[in-house]
Amino acid sequence: MSFDLTTIWAFVIAFAVLTYVVLDGFDLGLGILFATERRRRDRDVMMNSVAPVWDGNETWLVLGGGGLFAAFPLAYSIILPALYAPLVAMLLALILRGVSFEFRWKAQGGRWIWDAAFIAGSTIASFMQGVALGALLQGITVDKAARAYAGGWWDWFTPFSAFVGLAVVVGYALLGATWLVSKTTGDLQERMRRRAWFLGLATVGFIAAVSLWSPFLQDGYFYRWFEGTHILWAAGVAALVAGLNWALFHALHVHRHDHWPFRAALGLFVVSFIGLGLTMYPYIIPTEITIYEAAAPRASQVFMLVGAGVLIPVILAYTAYAYYVFRGKIDEDTGYH
C-alpha cells in the first residue's frame, strides 16, 4: 500500500500549528487583557489561571517549526528569509513575556515594569504571528531557478498583513476573555463576559473582512472560493462561522454558561484554520511552491514519521493530563510561586 507521505506531513505540521494557536492563543490573549485590569489581585488570578500550562503550550510551536525544517526544507529556506523580521520579533516577544511571567512574582516595587513587559510581549507576539500569516497569504516572491527568496526586506509588511496581525490580537483576546469566564468567578468573570461579547463581534468582523479580502490577493484564491463547486466550501465555512458565532453569544448572555463560550471561540479558530487550509492546499508557499515540490526525500519522511508517531501521542497525553489536573475554577487565595 502506498501512502502520500507528503500530504501526511502537511497535515502533521498543520495540526501542530493549529494546536499551538488554540492552546497558546488564550494564553497570549490573557496577556493582552492584562492591560484592562488594574487591581493586583485580579492580575494575579488571571496569571494563576495559566501558570500550570502556559510554557507547555509552546511545545507545539517548536514542533511546527522543526517539522517544517525537516519535512519541507525548501519551504523553510524560502519562508524564513522572507519572514525573518516578524518571526524574530515574535520570538523576542515570547522570551520577554516568559521572563516577565516569572519575575513579576518576586518583584516588589518594580512589579509594574514586569506587568508592562507581560502586556507588551503578549501583544507583540500575537501581532507578529498575524503579520507573518498575512505575509504568507499575500504571497512570497520566489526565484524558482535559484530556489530561493527573491523579495525585499520589507515585503512582509503591507496593509493586509498588518490587518491580519490586528485580527489575531483581537481573536486571541477573545480566547483569553472566554478562558477567564471559564476559570474565574465574581466581578472578574462578569467583566470578562462583557468583554467577550464585544471581542466576539470584532473577531467575526475580522474573519469576514479577511475572508473577503483574501480572494483578491492571488488569482488562484478567487477560483478556490467562488467558482464552480468551490463555492459550496465557502458557504459551508461561512455557515459554520455563523453557527459558532450564535453559539458564542447564546452561551455568554442567554444561558450564561461558563465553559461553552471558550469552546465556541476555539471553534471559530478551528473553522478559520480549515478555511485557510482550503485556500492554500496544495501550496505551501502560495502560489509558487507546492508541498510536493518542497518535500524532503521519501526515506527522510518515513524516518521522521516514525518518531512523530511516537512523540505526538506522548505530548498529547501529558498535555491532556496537565489540563485535567488543573481543571476547575481558580482559588483566589492560592497562587503560583
Image: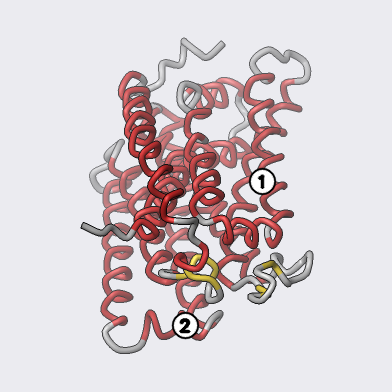
Mark 1 or 2: the one toward you: 2
Up the image or down, 231 lies above or below 335; here it is below
Q: Label 1: which residue?
A: 90
Q: Quadrant of residue 268?
A: bottom left
**Mark 1 is on which residue type?**
Met
Q: Label 2: which residue?
A: 220
Name the one closer to the observer, 272 or 12: 12
Q: Pointer 2: residues within 10 angstroms few (<14), some, or many (20+)?
A: some
The colour scheme used to paint the residues is: secondary structure
Up the image or down, 6 lies above or below 174; here it is below
Residue at the extreme left:
1
Q: Quadrant of residue 227?
A: bottom left
- Mark earlier in primary sequence (1, 2): 1
**Mark 2 is on which residue type?**
Gly
Give x and y (percent) for residue 331. Answer: 41, 16
Name the one closer to the observer, 209 or 254: 209
Give x and y (percent) for residue 202. Answer: 48, 60
